[in-house]
């Protein structure tokens, strides 16, 4: 897997499409081009692949001529993120680069400011909404925090873990996905949203240059929203271990042994990360099944077998429980094309 989270909640898709200048016809066209069936929007449990979401984001950005589609009172016109990258890539250290990022957004955004706060051991980027609209937009804050994190990791040339993340809203229904979106402890219902780094990660040099910007932006927003941190969290390591063994019957004892810990320790560590062995296994099966439905012509019963279900009926029931939809709904766009 390129990303530990191979699907995203359909709520991400709905919030991205909830732009005042996107009518239903345009929304349907964008969804079709991204390969996302329109009927999925009606199911709160449905998912889209990260590739589909990234494609949809790019399409909406082009249609709206806004690289932060409809999130702010003024659009970030095409090319804005390129100039941001050109500014930060010339910094000597990551700390200086992130300071430049905060100043760049003060120039181009009226609705949201980024505040860099530094202490002896920690550096934080705090989101400072300037309007009540931005204060109430969870999706906008999620995307902006991921942008900061993604740019920092890209500039470092390595995966920067987080000391923590503060979120100025209640846990959403997909809060369990945060263990993949943000590789660090998340706290909800805070006064302001913020992302925290251990200071030593930002004292190193910037390892990118102007010649690498085009490649980074061409994969946006996938590279800065969905970053693999398989070696960082135990839950990621469990998922990675299961990924190539879904067809086999594998139990928590087998995984614990492979990770050089007892089953009790593994259960405790996963509980500390807000998940469990069975949840990880089911989420992986769900995501692989959705990927295969979106990207292949394999019949659903064979997909079920590939994710560890001998009985097609059992797979259909499990898939409906996971996503609120039958496997056939995920094939609607492919069939129509």
Image: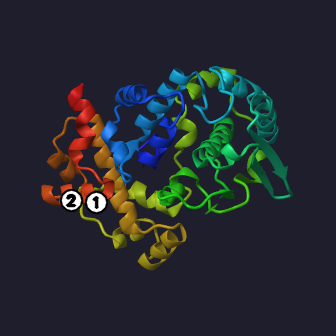
Q: Is residue 23 above or below residue 117?
A: above
Task: Check the image and report above or below for 222 versus 228.
Answer: above
Circles 2 and 1: CB atoms closer than 8 Å? yes
Snapshot quadrant of residue 39 = top left
Q: How crowded is mark 2: few (under 14 residues within 10 Å), some or many (20 or more)?
A: some
The secondary element bearing badge 1 is classed as: helix
Q: Is residue 244 visible?
A: no
Q: In which quadrant of the rendered image does the N terminus lie? A: top left
Where residue 84 sits, quadrant-wise, is top right
The answer to whether residue 286 is visible is: yes
Image point 68% across, 49% down: which residue?
A: 135
Q: Would residue 301 be found to the left or right of residue 134 on screen?
A: left
Q: Nearer the viewer, residue 323 or 98?
A: 323
Q: From the image, which quarter does the C terminus lie in?
A: top left
Nearer to me, 289 or 233: 289
The circle drawn on residue 317 is 2
Disc 2 secondary structure class: helix
| Residue 136 as seen in the image, left or right of residue 206 | left
Give the residue displayed 51% in from the left and 67% down from the top.
Answer: 274
Please state if 175 lies on the left or on the right of 283 as rendered.
Answer: right
Residue at image point 38% right, 47% down:
47
User: Would you name the residue on which mark 1 appears?
Assistant: 321
């Amino acid at each position: 897997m390129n990303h530990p989270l191979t699907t995203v909640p359909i709520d991400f898709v709905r919030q991205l499409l909830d732009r005042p200048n996107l009518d239903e016809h345009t929304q349907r066209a964008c969804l079709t081009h991204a390969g996302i069936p329109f009927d999925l929007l009606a199911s709160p449990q449905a998912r889209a692949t990260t590739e589909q979401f990234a494609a949809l984001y790019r399409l909406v950005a082009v249609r709206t001529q806004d690289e932060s589609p409809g999130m702010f009172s003024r659009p970030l016109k095409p090319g804005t993120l390129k100039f941001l990258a050109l500014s930060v890539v010339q910094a000597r250290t990551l700390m200086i680069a992130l300071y430049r990022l905060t100043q760049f957004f003060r120039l181009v955004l009226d609705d949201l400011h980024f505040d860099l706060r530094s202490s002896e051991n920690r550096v934080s980027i705090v989101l400072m909404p300037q309007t009540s609209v931005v204060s109430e937009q969870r999706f906008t804050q999620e995307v902006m925090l991921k942008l900061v994190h993604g740019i920092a990791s890209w500039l470092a040339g390595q995966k920067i873990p987080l000391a923590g993340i503060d979120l100025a809203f209640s846990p959403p229904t997909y809060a369990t996905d945060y263990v993949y979106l943000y590789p660090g402890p998340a706290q909800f219902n805070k006064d302001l949203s913020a992302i925290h780094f251990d200071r030593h990660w930002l004292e190193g040099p910037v390892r990118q240059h102007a010649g690498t910007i085009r490649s980074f932006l061409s994969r946006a927003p996938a590279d800065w929203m969905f970053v693999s941190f398989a070696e960082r969290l135990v839950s990621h390591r469990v998922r990675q271990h299961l990924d190539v063994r879904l067809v086999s019957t594998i139990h928590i004892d087998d995984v614990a042994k492979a990770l050089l810990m007892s089953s009790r320790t593994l259960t405790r560590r996963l509980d500390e990360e807000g998940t469990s062995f069975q949840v990880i296994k089911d989420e992986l099966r769900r995501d692989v099944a959705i990927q295969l439905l979106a990207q292949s012509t394999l019949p659903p019963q064979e997909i079920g077998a590939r994710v560890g279900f001998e009985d097609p009926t059992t797979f259909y029931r499990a898939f409906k429980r996971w996503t609120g939809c039958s496997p056939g709904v995920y094939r609607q766009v492919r069939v129509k094309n």
